[in-house]
């Protein structure tokens, strides 16, 4: 039978969670329609051994693809190339898909032919596995209709929401930056911009783990990888300038990128305050000037003060802004 859904699992040192990731696929009644690629990104733990057990037991479902470490984006690029299914969905090696809804989702994919299938997702807490909330459920959409993305002004999905037709990814030569964190934004924007039609599946499929220490959106992760977030941002700003031409998509992508710009300013404000970070912060602000439609949208009197005073007062302003964000319970976990 033809494969309906290819799942690209980004697997790097995920021996503790990989079985939880793979088990829902084993329980499916429609295994023959699944193409699950376990893309081992140079793991140094038992990720490969665990994956091989599943490949041997269900060779029609699972494939192990070993590669040198190249980061999250490299697993997607390999997945785009290797996918056998009509549709493509990404899954991180510490998250999982809904056991209850997976089979119905596979059947649904077999009935539609849109470029993108949107579905809400669920967040759960790392240590307790407690379900936090469902994100992205809309009463204005129904599973029976086809929607044209250029008519959905301002609508922008997250990485966990989207399932993309594999031909769309390949025909538009979508490629994601490698050796770089935070490239889920790049994946969503490039995929979204390449799609014309969307259908809506109302049940959550993706379960996203929150608050694991060391995640890219944890405070420690931000301090370690803030420069990669900046690299991703300017990569996508360049893509936006050169490739986004439809007005409705322009509005949605621009709003998303304004959020990403604001996030980078927040990242700089939680870094340890020193002269090196002050210089980097100012250089980032200067570089953003080449995109005035984004530079002008950064809100707040504190950033305005820094710009007006050549970033003098950085140490004091950074501490104030960091305190305000913590007080307002601004978090770095994407919740």
Image (tube, rainbow, N blue to C red):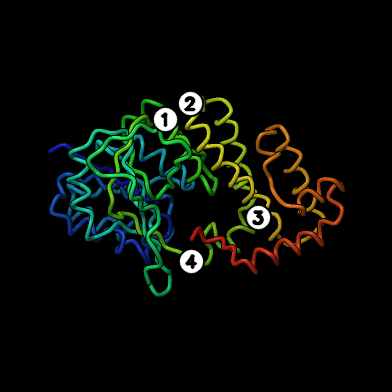
Position of the N terminus, as image quadrant, is top left
Q: Nearer the viewer, residue 327 or 287?
A: 327
Tell me the residue that label 2 is attached to: 246
- Residue 267's label in the rendered image is 3
Camera-near label (4 vs 3) is 3
Query: From mark 1 to mark 4, how far is it between C-alphas?
Result: 36 Å
Tell me the residue that label 1 is attached to: 150
The answer to which of marks 2 and 3 sits earlier in the sequence is 2
Query: From mark 4 to mark 3, how far is it between C-alphas?
Result: 18 Å
Check contact, mark 3 vs mark 1: CB within 8 A.
no
Give how far across and how far down residue 165 sits, in percent: 31, 35
* Residue at left offset 47%, top offset 43%: 73
Labels in figure, total? 4
From the viewer's perspective, is residue 81 above or below residue 243? below
Res 326 → quadrant: bottom right
SS assignment at label 4: loop
SS assignment at label 3: helix
Give how far across and how far down residue 254 sits, in percent: 56, 37
Check contact, mark 1 vs mark 4: CB within 8 A.
no
Within-10-Å neighbours for mark 2: few <14, some 14–19, many 20+ = few
Q: Is 80 on the left or on the right of 227, as rendered? A: left
Within-10-Å neighbours for mark 3: few <14, some 14–19, many 20+ = many
Query: From mark 2 to mark 3, how far is it between C-alphas?
Result: 31 Å
Query: From mark 3 to mark 1, how far is it between C-alphas?
Result: 32 Å
Res 152 → quadrant: top left
Check contact, mark 4 vs mark 3: CB within 8 A.
no
Check contact, mark 1 vs mark 2: CB within 8 A.
yes
Give how far across and how far down residue 183 sits, in percent: 51, 44
Tell me the residue that label 4 is attached to: 212
């Amino acid at each position: 039978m033809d494969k309906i859904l290819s799942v690209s699992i980004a697997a790097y040192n995920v021996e503790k969670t990989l079985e939880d990731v793979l088990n829902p696929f084993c329980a499916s009644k429609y295994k023959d329609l699944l193409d699950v690629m376990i893309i081992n990104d140079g793991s140094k733990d038992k990720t490969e051994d665990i994956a091989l057990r599943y490949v041997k037991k269900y060779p029609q479902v699972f494939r192990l693809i070993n590669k040198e470490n190249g980061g999250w984006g490299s697993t997607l690029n390999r997945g785009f190339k290797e996918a056998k299914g009509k549709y493509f969905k990404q899954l991180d090696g510490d998250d999982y898909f809904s056991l209850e809804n997976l089979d119905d989702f596979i059947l649904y994919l077999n009935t539609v032919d849109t470029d993108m299938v949107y579905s809400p997702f669920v967040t759960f807490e790392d240590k307790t596995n407690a379900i936090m909330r469902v994100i992205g459920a809309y009463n204005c959409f129904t599973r029976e209709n086809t929607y044209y993305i250029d008519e959905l002004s301002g609508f922008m999905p997250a990485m966990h929401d989207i399932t993309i037709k594999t031909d769309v990814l390949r025909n538009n030569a979508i490629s994601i930056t490698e050796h770089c964190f935070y490239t889920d934004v790049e994946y969503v924007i490039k995929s979204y911009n390449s799609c014309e039609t969307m259908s809506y599946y109302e049940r959550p499929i993706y379960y996203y783990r929150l608050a694991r220490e060391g995640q890219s959106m944890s405070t420690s992760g931000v301090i370690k990888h803030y420069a990669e977030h900046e690299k991703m941002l300017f990569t996508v700003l360049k893509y936006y300038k050169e490739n986004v031409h439809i007005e409705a998509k322009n509005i949605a992508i621009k709003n998303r990128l304004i959020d990403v710009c604001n996030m980078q300013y927040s990242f700089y404000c939680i870094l340890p305050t020193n002269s090196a970070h002050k210089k980097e912060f100012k250089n980032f602000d200067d570089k953003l000037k080449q995109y005035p439609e984004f530079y002008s949208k950064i809100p707040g009197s504190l950033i305005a003060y820094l710009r007006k005073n050549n970033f003098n007062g950085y140490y004091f302003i950074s501490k104030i802004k960091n305190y305000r964000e913590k007080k307002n319970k601004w978090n770095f976990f994407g919740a």
